Image (spheres, coloured by chain):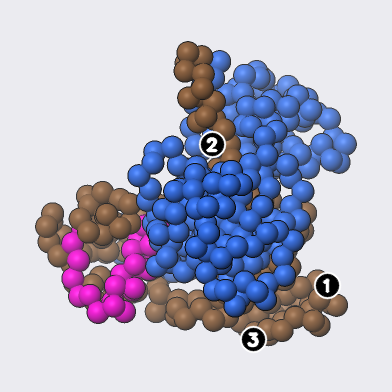
Chain colours: A blue, B brown
């Protein structure tokens, strides 16, 4: 029954999990694919197809049991197995991530360590999690069996830090730098969040759409 | 000559712009599509195709002039026109974004205002930019002609805040909440960065890949 899930499906199922978790907390017990589609910005067909990947059938109009769906998602996507995370680079973004995730109440991952190369900064940071100098990355990741690393270092250091995290044994990297990070190990998954890049894309979208509107006769 | 750029092309051109800007600062003057492809994680063919959207031709082996490419990108994507931005929600992530972007030295956008509904928090924040209580969102956006809004409020408030930002006149929203935000106005572009969601997707990727490796005979 195990099928490899395409990444877009996995992303949508992850959003579904987040939304259903909130509904569950509010005491809602059943929901239709139509309602889910409306909220998640997908067609009800896509919702049913995604859910069918979990092995649960649903036809148009059917209301899914939220408890059942959450149990399936939790089991299939491994959210019942806490994954240990670390953050490398405790500048503005890194520190905010540290504060954000150290109070994060989900159970699918737990922040357990932070790394920073600037020893002076390391000494001034107040943190609910253990902090270490950056030269100990590999040692601590191996010792604590950390599986996921968030990288929030200056762009020019991103590749080296990714290599060292992989050297320690992480199998997932969330890269917050604009650097395209590569690793030799195919078992390591990398996802990137380029905040300035997203803002730049938005800025370009506004510009190109305006340009087209203003010059309709020049549009191909 | 104006063509509507597909969003994936626009995203890649935006990364290209970022990388070329850094090369330019380092004094590099020419680069080939092969080298660009290596760094940006694309094939050289994709790089040449993307650049052809700008109206610049290149064949395999040709070295592009970095100055020329930057001038084309700047003009075509509107990076010479500063777009004003604001941040709504100055909690952990919002405050980090505020600090990050208030020292940001690129010229394509400028952070000019922050909004926060908690008046006590507003009074304790030290900020290089102007801060306002959240009830003034529409008024200030209109008055300052702000075009882009970053939303970092609690998920349940995201839609209302997006509506009010659009009411003030923004045409681009960068949504940092997991909420799927919708606006009626088709001229408004929305992009989302769901940090916890990305971490959850990574966590699921690790799990599903491990599951498949451990259960090869059950794989379809």
User: At 50% across and 66% down in the image, what residue appears?
Assistant: A153
In the image, are marks 1 and 3 on the same chain?
yes
* The C terminus of chain A, quarter of image: bottom left
Q: In this view, does A154 lie to the left or right of B100?
A: left
Q: Is residue A96 left or right of residue A139?
A: right
User: At 83% across and 72% down in the image, what residue appears?
Assistant: B118
How far is the residue under mark 1 from the one under mark 3? Answer: 19 Å
Helix, strand or loop at label 1? It is loop
Q: Which of B218 and B114 is in front in this view?
A: B218
Q: Is residue B111 magenta?
A: no
- Tell me if mark 1 has few (under 14), some (14-19) or many (20+) residues whose alpha carbon lies within 10 angstroms of its own: few
Q: Which of A109 and B88 is in front in this view?
A: A109
Q: In this view, does A59 lie to the left or right of A30?
A: left
Q: Residue B128 carries which label?
A: 3
User: At 54% across and 81% down in the image, what residue appears?
Assistant: B103
Which badge, 2 or 3, is on the more N-terminal residue?
3
Q: Name the residue under label 1.
A: B118
- Total marks placed: 3
Would you say the residues marked 1 and 3 are in contact, meaning their CB atoms lie under 8 Å apart? Answer: no
In the image, are marks 2 and 3 on the same chain?
yes
Q: Residue B206 carries which label?
A: 2
How far is the residue under mark 2 from the one under mark 3? Answer: 41 Å
Where residue A125 sits in the image (x, y, percent)? Answer: 68, 72
Which badge, 1 or 3, is on the more N-terminal residue?
1
Task: Identify the magenta region.
Answer: B10-33
């Amino acid at each position: 029954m195990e099928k490899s899930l395409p990444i877009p499906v996995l992303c949508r199922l992850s959003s579904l999990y987040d939304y259903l978790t909130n509904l569950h907390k509010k005491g809602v017990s059943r929901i239709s694919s139509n309602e889910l589609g409306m909220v998640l910005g997908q067609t009800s067909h896509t919702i049913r197809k995604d859910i069918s990947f979990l092995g649960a059938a649903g036809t148009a109009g059917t209301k899914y049991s939220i408890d059942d769906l959450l149990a399936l998602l939790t089991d299939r996507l491994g959210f019942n197995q806490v994954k240990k995370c670390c953050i490398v680079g405790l500048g503005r973004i890194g520190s905010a991530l540290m504060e954000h995730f150290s109070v994060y109440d989900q159970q699918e991952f737990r922040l357990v360590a932070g790394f920073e190369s600037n020893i002076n900064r390391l000494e001034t940071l107040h943190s609910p999690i253990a902090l270490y100098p950056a030269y100990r990355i590999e040692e601590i990741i191996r010792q604590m069996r950390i599986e996921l690393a968030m990288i929030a270092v200056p762009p020019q250091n991103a590749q080296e830090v990714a290599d060292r995290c992989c050297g320690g044994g992480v199998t997932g990297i969330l890269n917050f730098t604009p650097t395209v990070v590569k690793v030799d190990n195919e078992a390591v998954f990398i996802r990137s969040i380029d905040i300035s890049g997203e803002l730049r894309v938005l800025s370009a979208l506004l510009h190109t759409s305006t340009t087209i509107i203003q010059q309709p006769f020049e549009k191909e």
